[in-house]
Image (tube, helix red, strand yellow):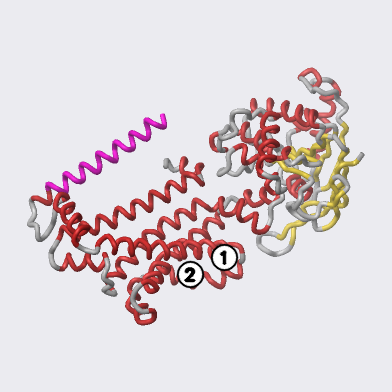
Amino acid sequence: MVIQLLSYKWLVRIVSVVAFLVLWQLIGQSVDVTLFSTPILVVGAFSNLVTQTAFLTDLLTTIRDFAIGFTIAAVLGISVGIAMARWQTLEVAFDPYVSALYSTPYVALAPLFVIWLGIGLVEQLVVVILSSVFVILLNTFAGVKNMNKSYVETGRAFGFSGFKLYRKVVVPGALPYIITGLRLGIGRGFVGMIVAELLVRLDRLGFLMVYYSELLEVAPGLAIAVTLGLIGLLMTEALKKVETRLSPWRSSATGG
Amino acid sequence: MEKVKVEHVSKSFTRSDGKGKTAVLEDVTFTVDDGEIASIIGPTGCGKSTLLRIMAGIAPPDSGRITVGGKEVVSSANPASAIVFQAFNLFPWRTAQKNIEFGLEAKGLPPAEREKAAQHFIDLVGLKGYEKYHPHELSGGMQQRVGLARALAIEPEVILLDEPFSSVDMLTRESLQHEVLQILKKTKKTAVFVTHNIDEAIFLSHRILSLGGKPATIKEVFDVDLPYPRDDGVMVSQKALTLKSDLKRALLSSPQAQPEEAGAA
């Protein structure tokens, strides 16, 4: 049954991808190459990028910066989110800032960050952290607040308290929300970082994408876009795997 | 010998509008002997569960004191009692076995010992083969077996059961009642049940305390002078039927009593 379900899922996925690529190829062929491109041309452009430019190095730098920034954002968002749910004073004190900062588009401030911090790692980290930390924080906060009260009561009844109660009961209980926060954070942080690259003219993928777009070199532009999309997909899938492992009741309830 | 002593316990709650307090329990006093199975019976909302939570150390009383095994209950750290909840309260991210080990983790037992202890109680409550299942994969009756094993596993002085069978269907309830009684007898555990089901109280207990009034206090104490096992013959004996009508009268004389469906939350 499970195996049937799995292969059914994969079947649909494969058919969907193939159909998409065929459709793209057909539409791409019927349009002028300066306006649109085809999957075959994009693959060619991709191999050119890999062999003839610093694409791979840039990609790795981008991934590294994102990984560092996102890790910091995750630790910060989860711990402050839990603290705000735990101490009402913190909640009352921080809530207006968090709500305001949550909806600020930080990428637009990237040029300012450059002036304050210079161009490069630190400025990129700040963009990633600010773009992703609040959504992680808010979801963690909601997760702890909305958690079934009986978990904590049961934890206490069986002798847990303080930090151990948080580690054994509160965090796992809030985990489905925390994971959702991380998932949204990945999206926001990654997009924020790429847009910042092009805004501050950091010589990386985001900038390269704009560069090719402006030259009407559609294929390499799309090659970069597809690469970034695939990275996003990989990160989200990895997180899903973590979720299935850590909160199996939840992933089965939502059908994986 | 007295295992549990509840002395002059009172408790009130701040009303939800924040104005004033509602007294729930007033001057509740009773004892439970070692190895005794006692039931606290009373209408829904009378404060039975609150009393049990106070006995478990989850909620502090406003005044009065509780001792379990000679030691005063001041908080739920290093609990001398273990509680079985009406809604099971299992942790959905833990397997049956890990749920049962939960209280042992709080005690700081090393993993190997936890596993061994858990296995013993898994066998005892009839969960063999279900160790790796998560609560959502188990029926209500099976989940409550996990809840029971989790409570037994910490080897408590007294086991507190808060309407443990009211969330399962009638047939499961009957077989669970039988099994729980057998387990309690076998392990010679002292137990306090909270229930609003008269038949259940008679079936299980040595003694029944009726809680009632507003605020609630112990109204009457009934000795259940019936032999174990309490099979159908015993349950329809003249003694049992008399006790049943006495208990019904005690429940209905409570000012806030309202006729109640068995199994209502």
Amino acid at dot 1: Met
Q: In which quarter of the image is the N terminus of chain A?
A: top left
User: Residue A11 in magenta?
Assistant: yes
Front residue of A205/A78: it is A205
Question: Label 2: how many residues lie within 10 Å, few (<14), some (14-19) or many (20+)?
Answer: some
Secondary structure, mark 1, is helix
Residue A206: image quadrant is bottom left
Q: Is residue B249 at all visible to an observer of this figure?
A: no
Q: Which mark sits nearer the N-terminus, 1 or 2?
A: 1
Q: Describe residue A18's horizontal placement relative to residue B173 as left or right.
A: left
Residue marked by disc 1:
A84
Residue B37: image quadrant is top right
Residue B178 image offset from top left, x and y in percent: 73, 26
Residue A134 image offset from top left, x and y in percent: 45, 65
Residue B154 image offset from top left, x and y in percent: 74, 41
Q: Are the two marked residues, 1 and 2, in contact with CB atoms closer than 8 angstroms?
A: yes
Q: Which residue is drawn at 90% across and 41% down?
A: B2
Q: In which quarter of the image is the C terminus of chain A?
A: top left
User: Residue A36 in magenta?
Assistant: no
Question: Label 1: how many residues lie within 10 Å, few (<14), some (14-19) or many (20+)?
Answer: many
- The magenta region covers A1-26
Image height of A251 relative to A149, above or below: above
Image height of A84 relative to B148, above or below: below
Magenta: main secondary structure equals helix
Q: Describe residue B124's horizontal placement relative to residue B134 as left or right.
A: right
Residue marked by disc 2:
A98
Front residue of B194/A147: it is A147
Cα–Cα span, label 1 and label 2: 11 Å
